[in-house]
Amino acid sequence: MFDALVLAPGVPLTHPKPHWTVELAKAAGVEIIGDVELFARERRAICPGAKLIAITGTNGKSTTTALIGHILNAAGRDAQVGGNIGRAVLDLDPLTPECFYVVECSSYQIDLAPTLDADVGLLLNLTPDHLDRHGDMNRYAAIKERLVVGAGTAVVGADDSYCLAIAGRLVRAGHNLISVSADRTHITSGLGFDGRAIIAAEDGRVVADLSGHTVLRGAHNGQNVAAAIAACRAVGLSDPEILSGIATFKGLSHRMQPIARRGKVLFVNDSKATNAEAAAPALKTFNDIYWIAGGRQKQGGVSSLQAFFPRITKAYLIGEAADAFAETLSGKTETVISGTLEKAVSDAADDAATAGSASPVVLLSPACASFDQFRNFETRGDAFVDAVMALDGIEPPDETGRGSRLWSLAFNADRLRTGSGPSTDGCLRPFSR
């Protein structure tokens, strides 16, 4: 006799067809759940006082999860961060009433967590993704909706039609809802971004000025910060505590991550941009871009990014998509077929060094999958970092006063230990799903 089938999130539950173990469990009347559901049940049974913040969305959930965890820890709280980022949820420290559990949830995990009941549930945005797993966009959105329906306080983005519909249903059902937006004009209550700061929509008060933040750039990060503020307020943090945490947040590896400077040139690792939509925020954020792009092309290529082509001074194309991208960019910006990432870094760094502008950016934002040349986007991003660190005259991306040689040695020594970037800067490294 089996009480339940605990399914790994990546095992097909419904589409394209159920795994054979799922079919057997259904035939035997055995419930099918996942690790997040086990965590939720354990919390209710032995430690309902432990605070649970659950975060989902198509984009931005890893950054928002890491930011919330960092704010809580910086404020002296014990925050355990995991789920679809870093540590598996069942590998977090044992439940205690004093601890805050900040859990990123993929759609796969939510689909296997029917009684998930976070104190605060965040749904940032919804765009088509994982439809091979869920069948269609409506089913995908319905699965994501479960996370906020079960939460005590729901924080929902207001920048797409699916989230707006979900927010409307929550309001009609009497849920406690906080709206957040990448554009403050989209909302009349909650927190929105005006291009420089997080604004309280009700009275126009500035809650957090992001204009000088070196990591949390762009409208998409404006929404991430607004959501993090709403969540941290909901679990009892004060605004000074929240603002202090935001100020010291160093970001996530491979997501618009400033990694180094050489003179006036900033190098940015955005390897997580595995399709055109994911590359758009970085292209929208920077000007005078020396763009490294390419890999295994996704459907549509980069044609949807044409509005950002004027920001690109020159493109350095790599991998299988190089020729196709060159054709799309022809007549829009100068291109060179670099072929490999190491060659692209060298080419772009040399050209950016002689740029006439005050702040050129060498940007790896490939708009492609990595699988033609790399195992995953993390190894691609690490290869970019290695190539940048091999350049002469590399300095930290901020004005910390650290010597470039010592900083580079520490960076690479930490990479050897952990397989990623520095572990002393508040960064968390999420899984790739």
Image: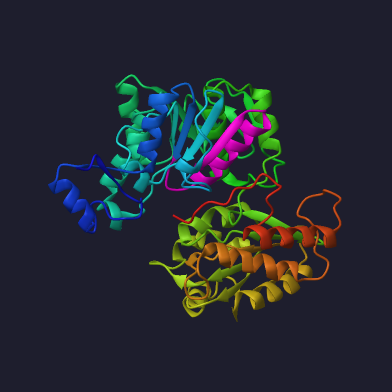
Residue 64's image quarter? Answer: top right
Residue lying farthest to the front in this orientation: 1
On screen, residue 32 above or below 405: above
* Residue at the image position 74 percent from the left and 67 percent from the top: 389
Spot occupied by residue 224 in the image (x, y as percentages of width and height): 54, 39
Query: Which residue occupies the foreground of this view, 150 or 37?
Result: 37
What colour scheme has been applied to the protein in the rendered image? rainbow
Spot occupied by residue 121 in the image (x, y as percentages of width and height): 43, 31
* Residue 161 falls within the magenta-colored stretch: no
The quadrant of the rendering that contains the N terminus is top left
What is the number of callouts on the image?
A: 0
Image-based side of 43 in relation to 23, left or right? right
Residue 99's image quarter? Answer: top right
Q: Is residue 388 visible?
A: yes
Looking at the rendering, the stretch of residues picked out in magenta corresponds to: 56-82
* Residue 76 falls within the magenta-colored stretch: yes
Spot occupied by residue 416 in the image (x, y as percentages of width and height): 68, 63
The quadrant of the rendering that contains the C terminus is bottom left
On screen, residue 321 above or below 119: below
* Residue at the image position 48 percent from the left and 24 percent from the top: 189
Query: Which residue occupies the foreground of this view, 217 or 380?
Result: 380
Image-based side of 126 in relation to 180, left or right? left
Q: Is residue 288 visible?
A: no
* Residue at the image position 34 percent from the left and 44 percent from the top: 34
